[in-house]
């Protein structure tokens, strides 16, 4: 039984002491686990005196958060400011488009209605940003001139191949894929996360454990898209990289450390040669750096500082650096930035390249006829030791990590090793880091998938050194997040998707739907009580897909490849694997029956089943159907197998086909044709009423 005072502290801190687990059963937090989680939040609670002190501090922080600098309000509706200003107050208002007005708070303490956007309100010495949000994010019909049923492809960018890529997928290969996908009728190309990683830590390459979600992975840039082929060929020749690049290109699996080392050498040479680039390019880089401001500057400082620390045999984690270096704006860090100006310019140059490359890919998507184009993937968190954690210390929780409680797929729970936002820290800063992150991910995309969107309502946080089972749910301001998402969707004209797989809080999916945020329905998960619902019964408020990067491909699922991997790696016993295979046989039979009922297949040939499964999804009312390349090409292996680390080649598999030709392979071409026709039929049915 948790003492009342401790429970009150948990409530003030936003921790849930009771919840419903993945099996639908009530679950409660133990007292010891609660004390550990509170300590991880900086609210020690070992004894009554500590509890009282922490409770006072938590209440003070909550009060400061409620008086933060950002006011989120409804666009085109009067704005209630009676808690901030007295009636009759005269204020200066600057709209997002630069217009300036003199306004007065009316007798009811309200400001006149304002359009969508971020507007600045000043009254004397007091200043607020007004985030005036639309009712919901933009929907598929609003983004496609009324069409309600579109389709797209999902691709792991690192896995793409093109001649001369040097062993890693890049934006040039992505542009090739975009062109051929658009030619076949695709309106969207969903991609793996391209967040900024660690140039000094090439061994850390999971796209879901980045250094920063507000910048990009420089290794995926195709510099020739910006600088021209001649400049790149000359740099490769100067460094004598051609043979090594050819060798890396021939590997079946990506050698991340070797590829990283080679690409960084090439990028450094390109930076050294940039002094001879055209004035137009140099001016564009200078403007990019000015526009990047503190966000870009701090990332570049962190990259240089981390590299220096590792070269000197010190920790690369900023939390272990000397005190003056832990503050991005300290005099010592400022001095370092001046001394290492050329190094910081190099990192900014790399960010400029990848930014401009992604802009070109999205332009290629739109020019080829895609209504959406790229759909970016935003990870649930970032490595606390990265540049984002260093730059946003007051907005992140540095002593806990994000994970998941025990569920149907992971009986021991999961610890993803990435940092969580501080709910109160975000409010106190006016959601600065969250908004910057959204804008960065939508900058060169027509849509964004939010990994584990349940994290906008609650996150399973785990204290340092604790097991995943000993975590707790921390609650977040869901409504604020959704309204800001709607505003950024409106500003960027972008589709918002939420990955809502796993343990989903009751009512969340309906809430997402009311805000036009598409959920996800995965073919492998939709079976219920031994039946797969007919296409007409699928949700029209979620995208439909065959699988995800963390799940087996359809071919791998049918053959039990994932079960074999887990048994081989010791994640399941022989007895458990046998039971899993029996269950899988039954599930495959259920799928086959559902496909037969729809008249999509007759035999049990796995390839025919794959064809029919993709067409089946095309028949659903889902606004968007996404099919991963793995299923279009009938691959058996999945990109990522959660849990085993390096024992499974996570994030390392490459395609043998070039991106420009892979969709013309007979199986892929056939499946895309069936999907495209199914979507057109679905659209016609909708038009016919």
Image: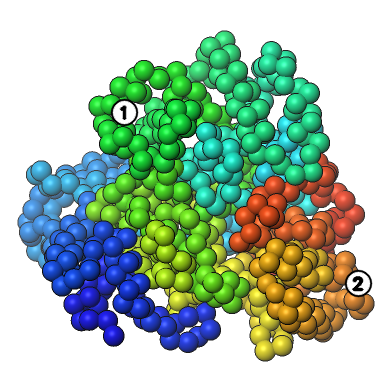
Q: Secondary structure at mark 2?
A: loop
- Coloring scheme used: rainbow
- Note whether residue 689 is visible: no
Answer with left or right where residue 674 lies relative to residue 496.
right
Give the number of callouts.
2
- 180 in relation to 165, above or below: below
Q: Position of residue 116 (x, y in %)?
A: 35, 54
* Disc 2 target residue: 605
Residue in the picture at 50% in, 18% down:
282
Residue 253, quarter of the rendered image:
top right
- Side (left or right) of 115 relative to 626: left
Q: Residue at x 53, y 34 (%)?
A: 199
Horizontal side of 652 relative to 352 (left or right) equals right
Q: Position of residue 603 (x, y in %)?
A: 92, 77
**Which quarter of the rendering shows the N terminus?**
bottom left
Real-space CA distance between mark 2 and mark 1, rounded to the nearest whole angstrom: 63 Å
Residue 484: which numbered mark, if any?
none
Instruction: Give the mark toward the camera: 2 or 1.
Output: 1
Front residue of this view, candidates 5 and 420: 5
Looking at the rendering, which quadrant does residue 158 occupy? top right
Residue 487 picture location, percent across and down: 40, 55
| Picture quadrant of residue 230 | top right
- Residue linked to disc 1: 333
Answer with mark 2 or mark 1, whichever residue precedes in sequence.
1
Examine the rendering and report whether any part of residue 412 can be seen. yes
């Amino acid at each position: 039984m948790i003492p009342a005072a401790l429970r009150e502290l948990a409530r003030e801190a936003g921790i849930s002491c009771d919840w419903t687990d993945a099996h639908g059963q009530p679950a409660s937090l133990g007292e010891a686990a609660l004390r550990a989680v509170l300590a991880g939040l900086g609210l020690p609670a070992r004894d009554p005196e500590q509890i009282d002190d922490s409770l006072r501090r938590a209440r003070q922080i909550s009060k400061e958060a409620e008086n933060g600098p950002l006011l989120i309000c409804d666009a085109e509706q009067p704005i209630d400011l009676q808690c901030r200003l007295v009636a009759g107050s005269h204020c200066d208002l600057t709209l997002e488009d630069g217009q300036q007005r003199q306004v007065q708070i009316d007798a009811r303490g309200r400001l006149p209605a304002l359009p969508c956007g971020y507007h600045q309100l000043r009254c004397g010495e007091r200043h607020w940003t007004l985030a005036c949000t639309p009712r919901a994010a933009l929907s598929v019909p609003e983004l496609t001139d009324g069409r309600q049923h579109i389709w797209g492809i999902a691709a792991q960018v690192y896995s793409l191949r093109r001649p001369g890529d040097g062993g890693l997928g890049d934006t040039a290969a992505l542009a090739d894929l975009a062109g051929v996908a658009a030619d076949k009728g695709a309106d969207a190309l969903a991609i793996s996360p391209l967040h900024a990683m660690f140039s000094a830590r090439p061994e850390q390459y999971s796209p879901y454990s980045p250094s920063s979600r507000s910048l990009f992975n420089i290794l995926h840039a195709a510099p020739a898209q910006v600088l021209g082929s001649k400049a790149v060929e000359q740099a490769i020749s100067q460094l004598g990289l051609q043979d090594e690049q050819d060798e890396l290109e021939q590997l079946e699996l990506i050698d991340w450390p070797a590829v990283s080392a080679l690409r960084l050498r090439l990028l450094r040479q390109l930076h050294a040669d940039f002094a001879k680039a055209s004035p137009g390019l140099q001016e564009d880089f200078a403007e990019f750096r000015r526009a990047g401001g503190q966000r870009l500057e701090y990332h570049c400082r962190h990259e240089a500082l981390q590299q220096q620390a590792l070269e000197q045999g010190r920790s690369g984690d900023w939390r272990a650096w000397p005190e003056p270096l832990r503050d991005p704006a300290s005099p010592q860090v400022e001095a370092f930035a001046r001394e290492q100006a050329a190094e910081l310019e190099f990192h900014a140059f790399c960010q400029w390249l990848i930014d401009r490359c992604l802009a070109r890919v999205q332009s290629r998507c739109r020019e080829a006829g895609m209504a959406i184009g790229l759909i970016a993937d935003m990870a649930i968190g970032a490595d606390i030791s990265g540049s984002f954690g260093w730059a946003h210390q007051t907005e992140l929780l540095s002593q806990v990590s994000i994970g998941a409680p025990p569920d149907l797929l992971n009986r021991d729970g999961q610890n993803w090793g990435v940092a969580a936002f501080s709910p109160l820290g975000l409010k106190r800063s006016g959601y600065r880091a969250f908004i910057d992150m959204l804008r960065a991910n939508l900058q060169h995309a027509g849509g964004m998938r939010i990994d584990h969107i349940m994290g906008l309502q609650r996150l399973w946080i785990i204290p340092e050194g604790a097991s995943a089972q000993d975590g707790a749910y921390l609650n977040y301001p869901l409504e604020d997040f959704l309204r800001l998402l709607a505003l950024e969707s409106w500003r960027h004209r972008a589709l918002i998707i939420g990955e809502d797989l796993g343990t989903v809080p009751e009512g969340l999916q309906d809430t997402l739907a009311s805000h036009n945020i598409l959920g996800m329905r995965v073919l492998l998960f939709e079976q219920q009580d031994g039946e797969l619902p007919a296409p007409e019964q699928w949700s029209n408020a979620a995208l439909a897909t065959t699988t995800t990067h963390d799940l087996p491909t359809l071919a791998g699922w049918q053959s039990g490849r994932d079960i074999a991997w887990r048994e081989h790696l010791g994640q399941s016993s022989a007895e458990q694997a046998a039971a899993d295979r029996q269950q899988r046989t039954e599930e495959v039979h259920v799928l086959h029956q559902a496909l037969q009922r729809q008249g999509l297949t007759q035999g049990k040939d796995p390839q025919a089943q794959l064809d029919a499964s993709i067409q089946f999804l095309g028949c659903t009312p889902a606004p968007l159907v996404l099919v991963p390349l793995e299923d279009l090409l009938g691959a058996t292996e999945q990109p990522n197998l959660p849990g085993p680390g390096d024992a499974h080649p996570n994030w390392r598999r490459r395609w043998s086909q070039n991106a420009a030709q892979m969709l013309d392979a007979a199986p892929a071409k056939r499946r895309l044709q069936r999907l495209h026709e199914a979507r057109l039929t679905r659209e016609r049915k909708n038009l016919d009423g």
